[in-house]
Image: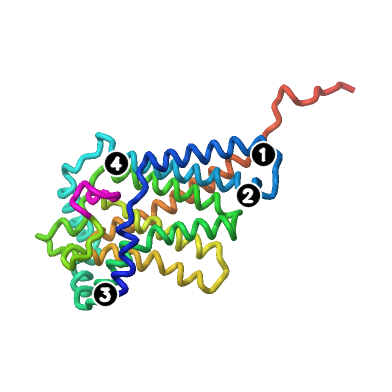
């Protein structure tokens, strides 16, 4: 299992693209679309234009997501208190404590390493692979799930401005920072890195895993779709077992995906509604 960990954690150490790098990529892709749009279509340019357009959109969304972390409204004050309130709320609605799950996982060294590796390395490649699969094999479903993903990420970003600390920051309640204790943490000091460690609510890991799982389940007819569908449940297990998220972080993320899909459904229905004839364009009635 040590070899598995060593071979897998290289992904977590890769440098993430900065907001300005992806903003430049978005601009270049947009310029490419404008350049090719007025040219005579060829077998080469016909698939490039829509792909460049989508890449420009995704890069722009990513750039905004990274840039939003620098806004002055982002404050860590109160994050610990909100986490304690969330723990009390979970107790009030009879959700099981994550502490028991952590203690069970810690009984097995292989399971500790599995949860840590899965948390660090799977969610981003799985989402990228899903979106490429949609684009290549199910283009007719791509726009629906791309829009739902964008709305979901936007909802998560807005909610995360109200900081909530993860369970691992509350050792007095019995929580353990599983990754750090074993020397397997993918995070540096608080305030550094691509991820905001005081923004547990909702879970981006679970949100993106829900897109992959529910998308594959509803679109694919392959028996393998059930294996992909398990991704969201494994992710919920992993983020809770490692002390990175509360149960409610995962529940809210999945609910937000449903909201995004509903907005996309009615938005497309509204955009495709038949136009009513304008009264001033109706033919005049001729009296007989």
In front: mark 2 or mark 4? 2
284 or 72, which lies in front? 72
Q: Secondary structure at mark 1?
A: loop
| Badge 2 or badge 4: first in the primary sequence | 2
Q: CA distance from mark 3 to mark 1?
A: 60 Å
Q: CA distance from mark 3 to mark 2?
A: 43 Å
Q: CA distance from mark 3 to mark 4?
A: 34 Å
Q: In the rendering, which numbered label is found on residue 69?
A: 4
Q: CA distance from mark 4 to mark 1?
A: 41 Å
- How busy is the neighbourhood of tag 4: few (under 14 within 10 Å), some, or many (20 plus)? some
Q: CA distance from mark 2 to mark 1?
A: 30 Å
Answer with left or right where residue 58 lies relative to residue 8: right
Whether residue 94 is in magenta: the answer is no
130 or 169, which lies in front? 130
| Badge 3 or badge 1: first in the primary sequence | 3
Answer with left or right where residue 270 lies relative to residue 9: right
Q: Which residue is mark 2?
A: 47
Horizontal and vertical percent position of residue 27? 48, 37
For the residues bearing labels 3 and 2, Cβ distance under 8 angstroms: no
Q: Main secondary structure of the magenta part?
A: loop
- How busy is the neighbourhood of tag 2: few (under 14 within 10 Å), some, or many (20 plus)? few
Q: Which residue is mark 1?
A: 274
Q: Which residue is mark 3?
A: 2
Instruction: Give the residue drawn at x 85%, y 22%.
Output: 286
Picture quarter with the N terminus: bottom left
| Badge 4 or badge 1: first in the primary sequence | 4
Above or below residue 262? Residue 109 is: below
Q: Which residues are magenta?
A: 188-198
Instruction: Determine which quarter of the picture holds residue 213.
Output: bottom left
In front: mark 3 or mark 4? 3
Picture quarter with the C terminus: top right
């Amino acid at each position: 299992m040590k070899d598995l960990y060593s071979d897998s954690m290289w992904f977590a150490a890769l440098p993430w693209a900065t907001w300005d790098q992806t903003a430049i990529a978005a601009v270049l892709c947009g310029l490419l679309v404008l350049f090719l749009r007025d040219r005579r279509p060829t077998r080469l340019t016909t698939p490039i234009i829509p792909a460049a357009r989508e890449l420009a959109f995704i890069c722009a969304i990513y750039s905004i997501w990274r840039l939003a972390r620098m806004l002055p409204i982002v404050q860590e004050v109160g994050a610990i208190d909100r986490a304690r309130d969330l723990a009390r709320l979970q107790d009030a609605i009879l959700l099981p404590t994550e502490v028991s799950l952590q203690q069970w996982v810690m009984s097995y060294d292989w399971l500790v390493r599995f949860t840590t590796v899965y948390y660090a390395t799977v969610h981003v490649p799985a989402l990228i692979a899903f979106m490429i699969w949609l684009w290549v094999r199910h283009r007719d479903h791509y726009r629906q799930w791309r829009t739902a993903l964008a709305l979901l990420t936007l909802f998560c970003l807005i909610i995360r401005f109200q900081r909530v600390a993860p369970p691992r920051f509350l050792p007095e309640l019995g929580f353990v920072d599983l990754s750090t204790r074993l020397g397997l943490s993918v995070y540096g000091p608080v305030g550094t890195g691509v991820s905001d460690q005081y923004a547990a609510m909702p879970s981006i890991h679970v949100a993106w895993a829900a897109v992959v799982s529910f998308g594959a389940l509803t679109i694919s007819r392959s028996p393998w779709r059930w294996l992909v569908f398990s991704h969201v449940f494994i992710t919920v297990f992993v983020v809770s077992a490692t002390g990175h998220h509360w149960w409610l972080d995962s529940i809210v993320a999945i609910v937000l995906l449903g909201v995004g899909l509903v907005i996309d459904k009615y938005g497309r229905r509204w955009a495709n509604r038949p136009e009513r004839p304008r009264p001033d364009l109706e033919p005049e009635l001729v009296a007989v």
